[in-house]
Image (cartoon, grey):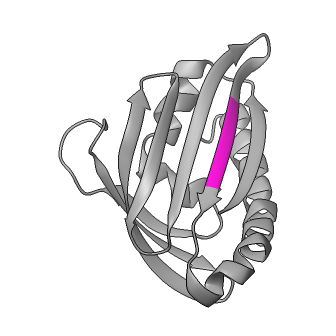
Amino acid sequence: MAETQLSVTIARPLEEVFAVLTDPNNTPRWSAPAVEEQWITPGPPGIGSRRRAVTQFMGGRSENVAEVTAYEPNRMWEMTSVAGPPFVVRATFAPVDSGTRIDWTWSFDFHGPMRLFGPLVAGIFGRQFAKDLAQLKRMMESGEL
């Protein structure tokens, strides 16, 4: 399994940051590869909720569906892909003096020949996600999100 870990501190209250990041409609605004995202299960997000995403990454377009496998409001959430590229993503949120710290872990579980490319894909993804987090920080701190 290949993994990427990143952190960012955003000078905004924890509740606001968590709300922005648990509304997938916001993702295309701050994440360059995100074409569209939305919840496909009704009601507020929680364990068992499913999210559909279309992304453009590394020259290809892909669609995935992920299910929330862990959820604690204003503390953490985790999603596991159930259709599309295999991944698990976990985000933990903590209040800090300067706002909110978010620690992200993306794990990619490639099989067969693709397993050899896992570390390469995780590295490329990590570099792009670092840019996306910088954009998220800028947009939240300026009030755009």
Q: Is residue 97 left or right of residue 118?
A: right
Residue 91 higher or lower than 107, as above or below: above
Q: Residue at x 77, y 36 (%)?
A: 8
Tell me residue 94's x, y (percent).
Answer: 65, 19
Residue 95 higher or lower than 142, as above or below: above
Tell me residue 22's x, y (percent).
Answer: 45, 40
Q: Residue at x 63, y 53 (%)?
A: 106
Q: Residue at x 75, y 47 (%)?
A: 5
Tell me residue 144's x, y (percent).
Answer: 62, 42
Q: Is residue 128 left or right of residue 22?
A: right
Residue 48 part of the magenta-drawn span? no
Main SS, magenta region, reads strand
Judge by depth and name the residue closer to the eye, 105 or 115. 115
Q: Is residue 119 left or right of residue 19?
A: right
Tell me residue 104's x, y (percent).
Answer: 66, 42
Q: Residue furthest left?
A: 42
